[in-house]
Image (cartoon, rainbow, N blue to C red):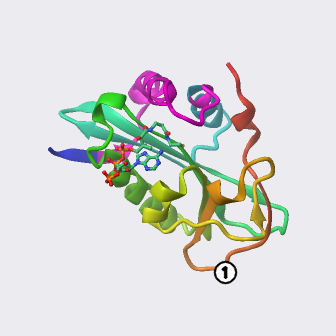
Amino acid sequence: MTITIRHEKPADIDTIARLTKAAFENAEHSSHTEHFIVDALRRANQLSVSSVALENAAIVGHVAISPVTLSSGATGWYGLGPISVWPEHQGRGIGSMLMNAALTDLQRLGAAGCVVLGEPGYYGRFGFKAHPGLELPGVPAEYFQATAFASELPVGIVKYHEAFDASE
Ligand SMILES: CC(C)(COP(=O)(O)OP(=O)(O)OC[C@H]1O[C@@H](n2cnc3c(N)ncnc32)[C@H](O)[C@@H]1OP(=O)(O)O)[C@@H](O)C(=O)NCCC(=O)NCCS
């Protein structure tokens, strides 16, 4: 397979929405609003990274990253997600390629680090782990993970952009 990763273009937007909706349709932990979240982040100019995976010129995956805020005042932190691969293409390494590309982009942006909410078994592969003291209220601690690029891991409460409340 030849998969390439590039940043989103305006012509990708509708496909990204359909892909995100389809990927989360049967996901175990899903609000089923993830496609609305990506659109709301874009409208709010908060898509720090939005990259697609292409195979034979067709979009097979997408990853979004947006800034988060920390109660400690620490700056330069981002949240990864949603990340989506079409169900029929899952398990082929596409998600891993998107993860690695997105984290490389973030480091190029000079980010301090990144948080993610999801399966520790998956995100642990990319250097994420849960850290006592770094908290996303309302979720089990082991599912909220972080990786620091250069700085120390901060402590405190993390807040995603209000676009994560989008429901339409
Ligand atoms: C999560 C997702 C992006 C991973 O993409 P992918 O292309 O399937 O991932 P890869 O092929 O790179 O990696 C597959 C590996 O990850 C594991 N994996 C995939 N989803 C997982 C999950 N939710 N929990 C634990 N492991 C998972 C697979 O078992 C597989 O393991 P293996 O390499 O030992 O066989 C994709 O499965 C997806 O779109 N899922 C639905 C949406 C979702 O849940 N997104 C994440 C929450 S933001």
Left or right of residue 117, residue 14 in this image: left
Which residue is pictured at 22% across the width and 37% down the height? 55
Mark 1, other Cα within 10 Å: few <14 / some 14–19 / many ≥20: few
User: Could you tell me which quadrant the N terminus lies in?
Assistant: top left
Secondary structure type for disc 1? loop
- The answer to which quarter of the image holds residue 101 is bottom left
The type of residue carrying mark 1 is Glu
Eyeballing the image, is 106 above or below 154?
above
Eyeballing the image, is 135 above or below 84?
below
Eyeballing the image, is 148 above or below 14?
below
Residues shaded magenta: 5-34
Mark 1 lies within 8 Å of ligand 1 (Cβ measured):
no
Which residue is pictured at 17% across the width and 33% down the height? 56
Residue, far left: 1
Label 1: which residue?
A: 152
User: Could you tell me which quadrant the C terminus lies in?
Assistant: top right
What x and y, as percent, mark residue 104? 43, 64
Q: Which of 66/138 is in front?
A: 138
Q: How many marks?
A: 1
What x and y, as percent, mark residue 146? 61, 65
Left or right of residue 31, residue 103 in this image: left
Which residue is pictured at 82% across the width and 67% down the height? 73
- The answer to which quarter of the image holds residue 18 is top left
Left or right of residue 84, residue 46 in this image: right
Residue 28 among those drawn in magenta: yes
Residue, far top: 168
Eyeballing the image, is 81 above or below 158?
above
Which residue is pictured at 60% across the width and 32% down the height? 30
What x and y, as percent, mark residue 39? 59, 29
Left or right of residue 74, residue 39 in this image: left
What x and y, as percent, mark residue 115? 62, 59
Residue 64 among those drawn in magenta: no
